[in-house]
Image (cartoon, helix red, strand yellow):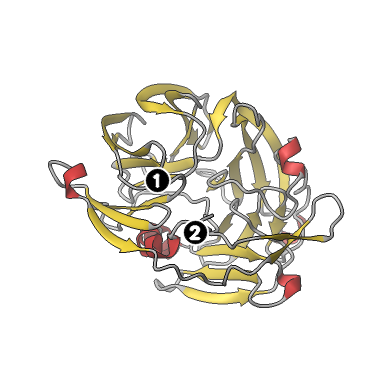
Amino acid sequence: MRAFTIAAALLAGHLACQHGLAQSGLNNLWLGGFGSSAGPPFGGTNIDFFSGAADITYINREMDFRRATANITDSSGQLLFVTNGYYIADASGDTMLNGTGINPSFYTQQFPDGLHLSQSHLILPKPGTAGLHYMFHGSYDDPNLGAAMYLYLSQIDISLNGGLGGVVSKNQVLIQDTLNVGKITAVKHANGRDWWVFCHKINTDVFFRLLVTPYGVGPHEAQAIGIVRPMDGGQVCFSPDGSRFAYYWGEHDLDIFNFDRCTGLLADHVHIDIEDENAIGGVAFSPSSEVLYVSSVEDVYQYDMLAADIEASMVHVAEWDSFYSPSTVRYPVRSSATGTRRQDLHSHWQQHGSIACDQ
């Protein structure tokens, strides 16, 4: 069994997409890793872009991360709070005030060491309200359908508990429907203040969008465009300038859309079949928004967004060389039932729930 997508090769492109946010402080800090109690090479890793370059450090912390991870920092680049999908921790690493009980589902209860869901959590500052943050999130609710049944909203006020923050409301249902697991992403409205938040309805071609303003989160609207998406993996991503949206999963490959930041509507759908064996992967734009990178199981491709024929512009830029870091040794994982350690057979890539905004 292949262990993970070659995300290391895609990393440069994906990190570049976050450059503007890193410079503003909001999303400069990426947190990952697990099993600090086992000692190196297990444990936490921080990747900090506040200086403009990746500063990577080892961190011994209580919270473990699998795929679900989202956090936000202040304008000076300091961590405010973080979640692994099972609970929310404050800047001290302790459970945030009222930070337990998010994502109520049987699935969530099985993974106190972090949900195994990509792009399932997204944190945004509430427009016009200092210190108040929205977290959009979901779990895995219907194993038969392979779907999330809810898009939730939780609100965090960082002024509570002596500045460590507290959850003032949680698990408010914004959308109750059959949703593709994860794929929660956002982009700045053209006014530079508000946000568009997106997710997808499973077994359809329907995208749901919500507008976030100083008055709150508006009711969701739907747009049918693209191909029918069944249960899937992979990632979605807006370009740094907000003009493009990409949706990638190996089985149904790559979809690219133009995006109108005023209306929130997608247009000009381009579907690209990628000729390799893949089931999961990642997607990211360059900082200029002119190049798109796709990471499949063993390969990385790039596409020219300015080309008349985007599919024909594909360049195969990297291939996995069979190296693992760490090696394929067993690693420790907490058991949800007993708190003891169980074993897993391979390492994997931690994918960051991220936001995109106008540069």
Among numbered discs 2 and 1, the one appearing first in the sequence: 2
Identify which residue is drawn at 33% across, 48% down. Answer: 239
On the rendered structure, is 28 left or right of 46? left
Residue 345 lies in what quarter of the image?
bottom right
Residue 260 visible in rendering: yes
Q: Position of residue 294 (x, y in %)?
A: 35, 51
As shown in the figure, which amino acid type bears the numbered disc 1? Cys
As shown in the figure, which amino acid type bears the numbered disc 2? Asn
The disc label shown at residue 237, or none: 1
Question: Tags 2 and 1 in contact by the CB under 8 Å rule?
Answer: no
Q: How many marks?
A: 2
The disc label shown at residue 314, or none: none
Whether 73 is drawn above or below 262: the answer is below
Q: Position of residue 45 (x, y in %)?
A: 59, 70
Query: Depth check: 231 or 19 in front?
Result: 231
Residue 104 visible in rendering: no
Q: 10 Å neighbourhood of mark 1: few (<14), some, or many (≥20)?
A: many
Residue 311 lies in what quarter of the image?
top left
Q: Nearer the viewer, mark 2 or mark 1?
A: 1
Task: Residue lying at the far front in this picture: please name it.
Answer: 1
Identify which residue is drawn at 73% across, 49% down. Answer: 111
Tag 2 secondary structure:
loop
- Mark 2 sits on what residue? 27
Query: Depth check: 343 or 286 in front?
Result: 343
On the rendered structure, is 234 left or right of 63? left
Residue 264 lies in what quarter of the image?
top left
Q: Position of residue 322 (x, y in %)?
A: 44, 67
Tag 1 secondary structure:
strand
Quadrant of the snapshot with the N terminus: bottom right
Quadrant of the snapshot with the C terminus: bottom left
